[in-house]
Amino acid sequence: MSAIFKTALIAVGFISAGVGGALAAEPFGIRSFGNFTQMLHKGDRKGMVRLAPLGGEKGTYGVGALAGLRGEVLLWDGKMLVSRGHSRKGTTEAAAASDEAVLFVVARVQEWREVSVPRDMTQPQFDAFVIATAKEQGIDTGAAFPFLVRDARLDLVWHVVTGEADGGHAGGHGGGTHQLGHAGQDVFRESVGRGMLAGFHSGAALEGVISHPGERFHVHYANPDLSVSGHVDEYRVGVGAILMLPRR
């Protein structure tokens, strides 16, 4: 594959709560629907945006969470998929016309640059690599930007929210310490030889809006055939994975 991967993209990610579809003045056409921090404080799980109008376009990507925190959302190359909490396995299915997201973010990218990951990296090392590489490519890392990872060897902890009260499952979207109205979740720990990531770096401007307060990365996982997906809590990325960043 060429060093520059071209595609029109709307990277749809994660957000929602107090605001019903606000347009953030961010690069790459990023829009946020709702607010992570407000949802944490108010426990409001209502739908903020319908998913159907955001799918179906080739070259669109994204992640999110279903209304009611009843599952995860993945938009990959125009395919709008949901991992419903009742599946218990993170299995995806096509989104229904009535599905809404409680958390959502959207970005538009015309062209991608590809960079090979030079060594095995822990999560903090990879996060730093994403930021450093983005700066080298002229991206303003004080603002939000999307990124993808493909052909990756990954060690993961990931989850799918179930919408249930937390009764035995770690609670909340974003890991056991990220309580969102005490929603339950199914947690998966595994190593995969080839996986994909879709994520956003929030920058300072959207920290706590499109990411958990105090964090600046929001990442989802998918297997190569898109049959399994969910929100990533912890990860290690192997040498040779391909990081994809939006071209300015």
Image (tube, rainbow, N blue to C red):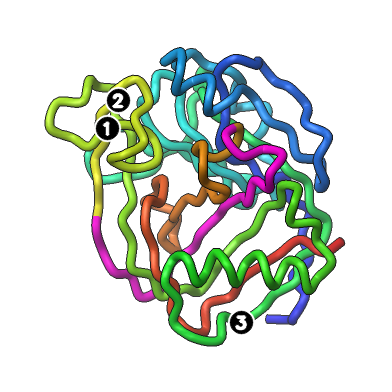
Question: Looking at this rendering, what residue extends furthest in the left direction?
Answer: 168
The local secondary structure at tag 3 comes to strand
The local secondary structure at tag 1 comes to loop
Q: Reading the chain from its start, which is encountered first: label 1 or label 2?
A: 1
Looking at the rendering, in which quadrant would you find the C terminus? bottom right
Indicate whether 243 appears above or below 109: below
Give me the residue at 33% from left, 68% from top: 155
Residue that label 2 marks: 183
Start-end of magenta stretch? 189-208
Residue that label 3 marks: 116
Residue 56 at x, y percent in the picture = 66, 39
Say which mark, if any, is on residue 171. Answer: 1
Mark 3–mark 2 Cα distance, whole angstroms, equals 37 Å
- In the picture, measured across the screen, residue 48 lies left or right of residue 30, that is left
Give me the residue at 74% from left, 70% from top: 5
Q: For mark 3, does the 10 Å Cα neighbourhood hold few (<14), some (14 to 19), or many (20 or more) residues?
A: some
Residue 205 at x, y percent in the picture = 72, 39
